[in-house]
Image (cartoon, rainbow, N blue to C red):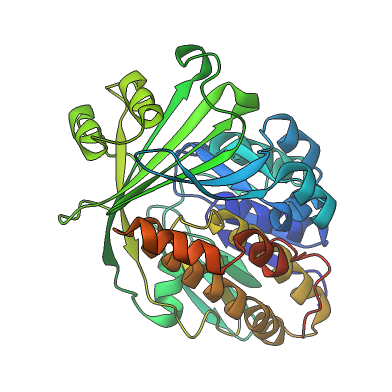
Amino acid sequence: MAAEKILIVGAGLGGLAAAGCLLRAGYEVEVYEQAPALGEIGAGIQVSANAMHVLDHLGIGSEVSVRSVRPAAYVFRLHDTGEVIDRFALAAEHERMHKAPYNQIHRADLHQLLAGAVMKAGPDTIRLNRRVVGFDEDGAGVTLHFEGHPSVRGDLLVGADGVKSVIRDSISGHVAAEYTGDSAWRLTIPREKLPSDFMPEVMSVWMGPGKHAVSYWIRNGDLLNFVGAVETPVATEESWTLKFPWEELRADFEGWHRDIATVIDLADREECYRWALYRRPTIDNWSTARATILGDAAHATLPYLAQGAAMAIEDGAVLARALKQCAEPGEAFRLYERNRADRTARVVSASDANRRLFHLESVEEIRRIFAERDEGDDRNSWLYSYNPLTVELS
């Protein structure tokens, strides 16, 4: 396709990655974000080789690595005794196999680096305080409508506006959210508050009946990231910013290993966040003739495979390649969707499966399942080995 003006809704990780890839491919890009200022909430995020290829392409791979921790291994433990049920290598082995590192980074740091890359490539690309309410399209382009601001015109539209996507709802109809039964605590602990030999630089999953916890280091090992997923019968608002009493957090993990108790005891009791996790069914159609979606708008996933952000980053790279490869936007969007739908659906399914595995009541059942599969080999064979910059698009 000849150079086009592409409008992107959403300046999260997926929207910024797409903007960076499209700018590098020679397109004019405008990103519209409803927030009044650029920023990102949340805490730790994991960026495996499949996403790092794209960040390298955008010129920020080395900076991401500087701000990250490279975990030596992925370790699965029992919640109370700490017994290691399974372990597979990361860090050096991951980079050797996939030609890019496995990094654990603060979400806000990654967002800042992506935003910087976009603004360097196109200083006027990002427009803030623009709440999108819908769009229209015709044979020549799209018109994007805002609350309280004039509409804008572009050739193509990309919805990177998350799980509550306005663009997706306009393309495929409203997708109702269903509470999964899980809510996730999130908190961070400065290293100086923890015992000096508290935990090695590994990715730890602690599995227990009806809940599990994940812990790993970020910011060069200066900060410990903790996420605790618990089955809760009452759903709350789908929000990252809701605070809950520390006493509820402590009660949820009563009887767990002393390392988990240490993290919770040292947590800032005024900064305990818990968000309800919702599921949305996979949709059959991501695109119109002039508009498409990516990331959580297209394939929201539970955070139990550490691949939600990676899939959004991959989407942006594949979309840019599809647009360059095809003469017409509709053809490009179909190519993009064909090459993303099955992979992202598999990630959603694998994340759901991990939720069931991590919450099993029976230790014997956990041991049996891990004995029957090689988790590391499985992920290396299909998940981490994917390079969105070189994979054949057909």
Please say if 382 is above or below 28: below
> Which of these two is toward me, 148 or 368?
368
Please say if 314 is above or below 274: below
Residue 207 location (% of width, % of height): 39, 49
Q: In the image, is 80 to the left or to the right of 341?
A: left
Residue reaching furthest to the left: 234
Q: In the image, is 188 to the left or to the right of 243?
A: right
Residue 284 location (% of width, % of height): 48, 85
> Which residue is depicted at the point 48% across and 33% down?
225
User: Where, by quadrant of the figure, is residue 379 drawn?
Assistant: bottom right
Quarter in which the C terminus is drawn: bottom right
> Which of these two is toward me, 133 or 101?
101
- The answer to whether residue 99 is seen in the rendering is no
> Which residue is depicted at the point 70% across and 46% down?
90
Please say if 245 is above or below 293: above
Quarter in which the N terminus is drawn: bottom right
Q: In the image, is 389 to the left or to the right of 158?
A: right
> Which of these two is toward me, 301 or 315?
301
Please say if 96 is above or below 255: below
> Which residue is depicted at the point 76% across and 40% down?
120
